[in-house]
Image (cartoon, helix red, strand yellow):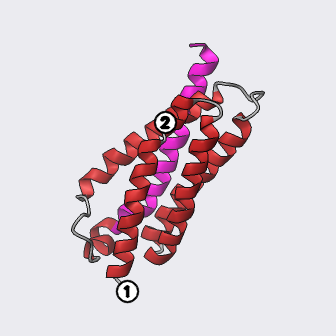
Amino acid sequence: MTFQNIIKFVISILICQLAGFVGSLFTTPSIPAWYRDLTKPSFTPPNWLFSPVWITLFVLMGVSAFLVWQKGWRHPHVQLALIIFCLQLALNVLWSFLFFKLQQPMFAFIEILCLWLAILLSILSFLRVSKLASYLLFPYLLWVSFAAVLNFSIWRLNP
């Protein structure tokens, strides 16, 4: 791997982890009070599980973005793929803001549907550049699918 690709790899991982960190700034303060007191469905994972899952998913996202970025800006589909990827990353942070900071499960549910679509579009756009990059986003799509069901259930259980 060239030095330039090492830099791209590190930047890709750091950007994704930074998105996770920003989201956690909205999330963490709400866990011991507001989130704890919500009525949650029986399939809600324990709180300790969310952090390692998200850290892992953000690493996979970073590797995925790197695999696309390393193809170079002149590749016909790289720029659009990375724009869509950045959009889904921003939507990921926005979900944490809506759900935890604003404590609005209904708006967060509407937003997570947009996030899910943006992840799917990222997968499809990455597929045009790197199959592996595309495949690395599948766990993320599955987790956000589960999170959408959980979000919907929390919204309905807490009118």
Residue 134: which quarter of the image? top right
Q: Give the residue at mark 2.
A: 135
Q: Position of residue 18 (x, y in %)?
A: 51, 45
Q: Is residue 9 above or below residue 138?
A: above
Which residue is more in the foreground, 14 or 95?
Answer: 95
**Element carrying mark 1:** loop
Mark 2 vs mark 1, CA separation in Å: 37 Å
Q: Position of residue 140 (x, y in %)?
A: 44, 47
Residue 11: which quarter of the image? top right
Q: Position of residue 151 (x, y in %)?
A: 39, 68
Q: Give the residue at mark 1.
A: 159
The 10 Å Cα crowd at callout 1, few under 14, some 14 to 19, many 20 or more, is few
Residue 144: which quarter of the image? bottom left
Judge whether residue 9 is colored magenta.
yes
**In the image, what residue occupies the spot 57% across and 35% down?**
65
Which residue is more in the foreground, 111 or 4?
Answer: 111
Residue 24 in view (yes/no): no
Q: Position of residue 131 (x, y in %)?
A: 55, 30
- Horizontal side of 128 relative to 45 (left or right) equals right
- Horizontal side of 15 relative to 71 (left or right) equals left
**Element carrying mark 2:** helix
The 10 Å Cα crowd at callout 2, few under 14, some 14 to 19, many 20 or more, is some
Question: Which numbered marker is on residue 9?
Answer: none
Residue type indicated by callout 1:
Pro
- Horizontal side of 8 relative to 140 (left or right) equals right
